[in-house]
Amino acid sequence: MADFESSVNLIRRAQDGDSEALERLLTRYLPRLQRWASGRLPSSARGMADTQDLVQEALIGTVRNLKDFNHQGEGALQAYLRQAVMNRVRDEIRRHATRPSGEEVVDALEDPGPSPLESAMGRETFARYDKALLVLEAMEREAVVARLELGCSYQEIADLLAKPTPDAARMVVGRALTKLARLMAVLRLPSR
Amino acid sequence: MNIDETHLSGLAAAVADGRRVDWKDAESSASDDDRPVVQQLRALAEISRSRAMPSSGESWGEFQLLEQLGAGTFGTVFRALDERLDRVVALKLFHVDASPGSRVAELAIKEGRLLAKIRHPNVVTVYGAHISDGRVGIWMECIEGRTLREIVNERGPLGANEAAIIGIDLCRALASIHAAGVLHRDVKAQNVMRETGGRIVLMDLGAGELLRADIRTGRVVGSPAYLSPEVLGGADHSTSSDVYALGVLLFFLASGRFPVEASTIAGLREMHRSGRRLLLRDLRPDLPADFILAVDRATAVDPARRPSTAGALEALLASAAGPGLSRVTLGRRGRLGAAAAVAVAVILTLGVWRWSINDAGRTNPAPNSMAVLSFVPDDRDPVGQKFASGLADELVARLGAVGGSHVVSSAASTSLSPDIARRLGAQLGVAYLFEGRVSIVGDRVRALPRLVEARTGATAWAQTIDASARDLLAARAEVSQQIAARLREVLVGPQLATERGAANQDKEAFSEYVIGRQFWSLRTAEGFSEALRRFQNALRRDTKYAAAFAGIADVHSLQAVYDPDQWDEKTNLALKNAQQAVALSPELAEAWASLGYAQKNRFDFLAAEQSLRKSIALYDGWAPAHLWLSVVLLQQARFESAVAEAKRAHAIDPVSLGNNRQLAVTLLMSRNYEDAIKQAQRIQTLEPGKPQPFQTLSDAYMYQGDFVNARSAVLKAQELSEPGIALAPVLLSNLAVAEANLGRRDAALKILHDLIQRFEIHSQGNAASVACTYLALGDRAGALNWLRKSVAAHESESGYLRIDPRWDSLRGDPEFERLIQAVRPSNRKPGE
């Protein structure tokens, strides 16, 4: 499992053009980011361009542009990468979704449809979940995403959150889930 | 910590661990305050459950998951690529968690090995089983077709003959499974597929032991209506309970009902106990007694009264499928009357017709419409019967592969006297009737197909076709291919490679081509690359396969349209391949259509139109030719013809979204705003809840000057769009135009700023939308400037500059006219 210092170090080296460092960063983060993105992107959007490639390009772009990330720990770094990659992927999808009407192109305008997570939970519940996540403390949020969306083991989560044991990580996840469920139960969603 | 808190923490821990929770119980035992929280925990559990299963695009072991085919209680089935063998398979991943070394894991391997030993044409071939990523997976041959349940739901109950023949296949399938020492445990209509070619395949093996291992206490495996009374009572599954389930399946095929129906397991048990069950002879008194007897025996409450093996049931069914069948009662089919009961399938060979849509065709039959009647075996032996019925089915499948086909009814056959032919033709609304006889003598199959003109009863075509009887499946395929090809030639002349190719083409190449076309029609990046792969496979088998070249051309053409960055490269490739296709097979409709579309993408409208018209002259039923001709005509402002072609494409395939949308756009551009609005509303019914039709609506309202409705249509589209995904620039610019015209310049300016930023900074978005917004704000110079960018970027709006109503106020401006010329270098023949 990645330790934070080495991640920051690898990012610096990658920015200096060290391709081996970039390779190692990709090995470290790419599978999880791809998995996460696959739950969050509507399937038809993923049909548009190969998500795997899209996420990889976005991650490389993010790593190259990352400045001074040196004080918040591995969990926060992963959260940051996730958000940055998602923004880039979304941009890309929008670029493809903004084709005008006319002949064959009209197909591209189709509503991309729900993401797998939305399908599983329902659109409204997913919106509730997504919003409540933002209200959680950063560490709790990472714990929930890592466990539920990425399927990380407790050992991996312990490494990610700098917890001494898998059991400690399990406690964090459990508490975060209780808090999340309470938030979801009371959260008001804007009526659309 | 109070009790409730402990309760919640326990549930949260279970969710975190991915353990199973009895949510009903958890909710009912929670306090009123906590119940909503428990409900949210349950929603969270859904996340880990759904994420635990890999999704398409990911891998499992050596398999690349291509597409999810279905998901059930116990597992999810994917179309997957076995990367080691480069073979597409159906991969079933079970929900059960199986870490290596566990009992479930061992059982999986054991059962997989057993299943892989079963080789039978009517049983799905299992290739292997494996544990990877903590998940059990079984992979097997990928079957393309429909389930018996879909078929019955769509067509209604089958005739006794067809049901019995399917039953015989399934008995043999079950016998081979039982012989391998395996029980199926879940025989049901949803688990039997009929392949496009007619083969009946029993699916969903491997649910057996594996499932039982996961079932903790007292849970009943199987689908309730198919469960035998003893299994419902708690007994283990047995060969006899599989036979019972097959009996229920036959009952369902013949009636659409089940012998015992109730909404709960307890209800089913009670019905069995009190002996209240439906009788097939009450539901279908027209069925032959032998068939009813066979089903009654198989579904007997007392296992001792059932046929002791699947083979014994087969023997009963075979006698039912014998001479008894000719006694099928005519007239049970209601309005169609006695004679119509012999009809098996009505097909419009042009593929333009759908049963529900064009009933008018009955009184005035289309010149190429035809009903396929059963083949009659010369003698009554079950092998001949089965061969004949399968042949008719396969022929129907082949002829219906491209257009719509509809199976009307199935029953016995008769020989067509001129009088019967006339009556049948009138009742079915077809111009031709097809019948045939088959005989199997020694190692030869002989088929005598005959095409009869319904109006006169005269024979239009007849031929003798011989094949080797050594492999009856192969013989059936060969005979039906030859007949289908000849029928096409007689009825419509040169036609599509999708059918004609079958007769003289390498079978593998042909099949790759047909599959490629299906992927192509998905219109997604993945679809295109898979289609390309399939067409290339076809070419590897047959380097002179014109249709495959045409398919490759069409992939490139559409890729150019979807991604203008690659316009020149893809268009050139398309042109090259289309030319190759035409050179190889100048009589092939698809080849000319592909050439025409590639030429259109080069803006060579004159040549494009000629090629597309040539394609239509060769064969009128290839919808893309009409669709593309409509585009070519539209871009030349030949509105009336463009609308006519769009309507023709729509008539050929009225449920295709692409055809519907093209019709809407054509109406819009032709300034038929009322009709465009109606068409947009029709699309809404095709894809309810989707934002796309609202764009057409907002365009139509905007062009009419109804900015209030134009604005609300945009807002409606926004409401239906994915949260977090910004509106398409085209819609945003419509909003800006509406705001500007409703006196809210500030709002319009803000949108303009946003659109420009998107284009300049984020390199997304589209220049034509910026131009349109400038125009609404009264800045013609700004509009023209951005239109130049749009043309330079090959945005597809540029093809519509000449006709799009949104530029009407620029018409006549020399700069604007110059831009139009810049787009269409070789269009030298405007107007009709």
Image (spheres, coloured by chain):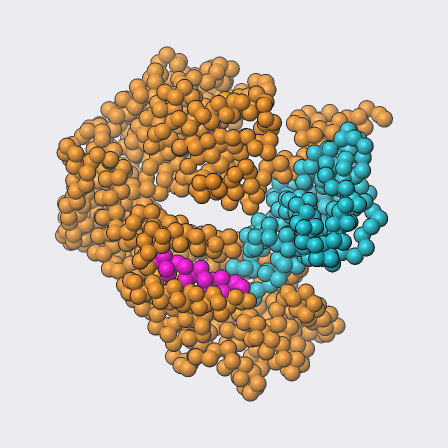
Chain coloured orange in the rendered structure: B
Q: Determine if residue B359 is in view.
A: no
Point 77% across, 29% down: residue: A167
Q: Is residue B2 left or right of residue B568?
A: right
Point 47% across, 24% down: residue: B111
Residue A133 locus on image (x, y percent): 76, 44
Residue B621 locus on image (x, y percent): 33, 59
Towards the viewer: B73 or B706: B73
Q: Is-magenta flag for residue B550?
A: yes
Q: Looking at the image, which residue sits at the far bottom?
A: B814
Q: Number of callouts in the render? A: 0
Q: Is-magenta flag for residue B174?
A: no
Residue B397 locus on image (x, y percent): 32, 45
Q: Which residue range is magenta in the image? A: B547-563
Residue A174 locus on image (x, y percent): 76, 32
Magenta-highlighted stretch: main secondary structure? helix
Point 22% across, 52% down: residue: B486
Towards the viewer: A153 or B72: A153
Q: Is residue B721 left or right of residue B467?
A: right
Q: Determine if residue B794 is in view.
A: yes
Towards the viewer: B668 or B428: B668
Q: Give the image quarter of residue B276.
A: top left
Chain coloured cyan in the rendered structure: A
Q: Give the image quarter of residue B44.
A: top right
